[in-house]
Each structure stands twice: as C-alpha cells, then as structure tokens.
Amino acid sequence: MDQIKQELKKQIIEQLNLEDVAVEDIADDTLLFASDGLALDSIDALELIVLLEKFYGIQVVNPEEGKTAFKSVDTMAAYIQQKTAQ
Amino acid sequence: MTVIKGYCHINKEDCWVNGKPVLAKTDDPEYSWLRQIYNFVGLSYPKFHKMDQLAQAGVLALALLKHEGDLPMDYSEEGVDLVLANRHASAGSDLRFQASYADHAAPSPALFVYTLPNIVLGEIAIQQKWYGDHIFVVLPAFDPDFFIQYAQRHIQQGCQAVIGGWLEVTDTETDVFLFLAEAEESTGKGGSLPLAAINELYRQPMPSISKL
C-alpha cells in the first residue's frame, strides 16, 4: 500500500506538471482539490482519471466514485487496491 | 486620444521593455527560455507550469510589461479589454495533442485545453481578475490598423485600458509583442506614445543583447 502511495505521488506530480511540488510535500491525507491542499482543478481531475487508466488499467465510469476516490492519495490508493482486487 | 503607455518584446533570445534590453537567454540546461523569464520576473504561480507555451508567453509578456515597465495596472475588474493575434493559432499544442493520440490510448485533457489560442486570454483574465472583453484573432501578419481601431474604439467606449499584441509562439519561432493603451488624459504611469506608432514599435530593431 505504501508503495502504491509513493508511486501515486510521483505520477500525480509528473502527469499534472506540478513543478513546484515534491513527493515529500504531499502527505497521504493532503486534500487534492482543497485550496489549502494541492488546489487541483477540474482539468486535473480529468488527468487523474487518465492516470488511473494509463497506469492501473482502471476506468472511472461512476462520477460519484471519483468524488470519493480523488480526495487524497490515501483514498486513491485504497480505490486502486479495491479495483485491482476485483 | 489613445496612447501607448508601454510595450514589450520577447523573441527567441531576448526580452525588451519599452525599447530597452532587460533579459538575455542563457544556456542554462535546467531551465527553458520561458522558464528563465518566469524566474526573472519573480512569478510564483503554480498554474503557469501547466500552461502551453502560447499561454506562458502571454502571461510572461504581461508580467514583464507590468514590472519592468513600472505599470501598476490597477484597473477595475471590467476595466481592461484584451486583444491578441497571431498567425499560427495554437498549432504547437494542436500537433502535440494529435501526437498524444498516437502515443497513448487516452490523450491528455490538459493538453486538449490549449488547442484553442484564445485560452491565453482566459489565463490572463483568471490570473489578473480582469473580466472585460477579450478577443484572439488569427491574421496572416501583424496588422497595425486592426490593433489601432480596436484600441481606439474600446477606449472611446469607456474601458480604462486595452492590452493587446502579437503572440506568435511555435517550436521554431518566438515573436511576442505586447502593448498597453490608455486614454491620453488617464493619470496612470507610463509613457505617452501615439497609437499610430504601433507598427514602428512592433518592428523596432532588437539586436542580440549578448552582442550589445
């Protein structure tokens, strides 16, 4: 699980071009879309959907699932684990 | 009468503000030319790094004009109208997006956003909180009459300032010219060049700064 979280942090930084952000800046529970978190926007949300498909083969087809899954690296990792276990 | 309060140029090697050299590109392998300008103007704007080159060039030209031209640009939210033009629209991002289809099963949404040249205007509007009229026009070449008429008409109609110019950024060409126009009687800082001189200002010779 910890390995998935580390990979996710690297992938988020790379895919979303977060040039001023380092892996160490993202805590497992940092809110991805909150202004006091990573402050991602709606285009970033689409990029996260693409990221899950590209690296994990997961298609987010239910928007409600995305809302919960994309809260933080913690929730994304749990979502990946749940989907890959199915 | 409408006058030009300030203007700037960015080409492949240098930045000039009001006809004066301000920055020359270095061979720093860590930073691209646009990133060198970003560092120079002291911007701290994370969204900048997600933009395409066209949008980055627009944001940087404005920052150069504002800071190096000593123009406060403290207008009301509706007080500024923007007019930009170029020849190749968003061709660089269009090609990159097209290539991303070939490379990945799922092309990048962040790349897709920039496959319209007018996105640069939205980026400037969001960054500056300027919500006046704005337009991006694709022209075969820099057309001084187009900018003169636009600026005169919009200033006459009551907007505080018009910021406009030519924004041609491709993989092989960087030709950026941005000007700020206001009514002559405005009390804002800056120079007072006649709007009719816009063609000469755009075509002003810019010898390589490193050879000056």
Image (cartoon, coloured by chain):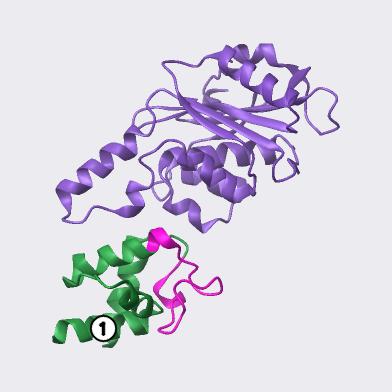
Chain colours: A green, B purple
Picture quadrant of residue B152 = top right
Side (left or right) of B166 relative to A15: right
Picture quadrant of residue B109 = bottom left
Rendered position, B72 above or below B107: above
Task: Answer whether residue A18 is visible to the viewer in this image.
Answer: no
Name the quadrant of the C terminus of chain A.
Answer: bottom left
For label 1, the residue is A3
Kindly state the secondary structure of the residue where label 1 is placed.
helix
Q: Residue at x 75, y 20 (%)?
A: B2
Rendered position, A8 above or below B38: below
Percent x, y of residue B74:
76, 44
Would you say residue A43 sits in the magenta stretch?
yes
Q: Residue at x 53, y 23 (%)?
A: B211
Would you say residue B39 sits in the magenta stretch?
no
Please name the amino acid that badge 1 sits on.
Gln
Percent x, y of residue B77:
70, 46
Task: Answer whether residue A68 is visible to the viewer in this image.
Answer: yes
Which of these two is toward me, B80 or B211?
B80
Magenta stretch: dominant secondary structure: loop
Percent x, y of residue B100:
22, 48
How crowded is the residue under tag 1: few (<14 C-alpha within 10 Å), some, or many (20+)? few
Percent x, y of residue A31:
46, 78
Label count reads 1
Q: Residue at x 52, y 46 (%)?
A: B123
Name the quadrant of the N terminus of chain A.
Answer: bottom left
In the image, which residues are magenta? A21-44
Q: Residue at x 34, y 79 (%)?
A: A69
Which of these two is toward me, A83 or A55?
A83
Picture quadrant of residue B12 = top left
Side (left or right) of B91 relative to B190: left
Rendered position, A54 above or below B10: below
Q: Chain of mark 1?
A: A
